[in-house]
Image (cartoon, grey):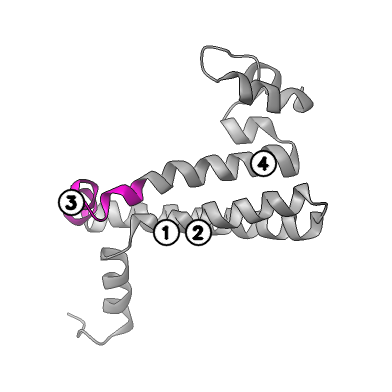
Amino acid sequence: MPDSSSPVSGVREAVRSFSPAYFGMVMATGIVSIAAQLLGMSQIAIALFWLNIGAYLVLWLVNIVRVFMFTGQFFGDMVDHQRGPGFFTFVAGSCVLGSQFVLITENCPVAIGERSSRRACTRPARFNWRMRWTCRSCT
């Protein structure tokens, strides 16, 4: 059993106490990236976009590990009044990253999880009119 000062126990503790609100970083980076794209600073926008993809994947990986290693703590956070609202950043961060895929790479299928951009951007039952309008450039 490792002592409490070992690097492994430090990583375990970091994963155990990992805040669900860290997806706010994906939101903020994505918003700055989209702003840079709209202001014509494409290189900055693309760099932040790739940084955001990396952060998104790492955050999901840590949360998946947390679900399996610290199930009680993870689901306890969902009902906690202080930490629970942080789970909303999962959804918001995913939406901002999807917006980056649409606005920076014009990749609608990846943004909304469809294989065909034509089919993805014309499904009114599943997506609102704003998404269909945004995806018009992709079809």
The residue under label 2 is: 25
Q: CA distance from mark 3 to mark 2?
A: 22 Å
Check contact, mark 2 vs mark 1: CB within 8 A.
Answer: yes
> SS at mark 3?
helix
> What's under tag 3, amino acid-wise?
Gly
User: Magenta region, mostly helix, strand or loop?
Assistant: helix
Locate residue 19 relative to residue 116 in the image: left or right. left
Q: CA distance from mark 4 to mark 2?
A: 17 Å
Image depth: mark 3 or mark 2 in front: 2
Nearer the N terminus, badge 4 or badge 3?
3
In the picture as drawn, the residue positioned furthest to the right comes out as 40
The residue under label 1 is: 22
Q: Position of residue 3 (x, y in %)?
A: 19, 85
> SS at mark 4?
helix
Magenta highlight range: 71-87
Label 3: how many Cα within 10 Å (few below 14, some 14–19, many 20+): few
Q: CA distance from mark 1 to mark 4?
A: 20 Å
> What's under tag 4, amino acid-wise?
Phe
> SS at mark 2?
helix
Check contact, mark 4 vs mark 3: CB within 8 A.
Answer: no
Check contact, mark 4 vs mark 2: CB within 8 A.
Answer: no
Residue plotted at (69% across, 22% down): 133
Nearer the N terminus, badge 1 or badge 3?
1
> What's under tag 2, amino acid-wise?
Met
Residue 101 falls in image quadrant: top right
The residue under label 4 is: 101
The residue under label 3 is: 76
Residue nearer the viewer, 46 or 110: 46
Residue nearer the viewer, 7 or 15: 15
Residue 104 located within the stretch drawn in magenta? no
In the image, residue 90 sits, relative to residue 110, either above or below, namely below
Q: CA distance from mark 2 to mark 1?
A: 6 Å
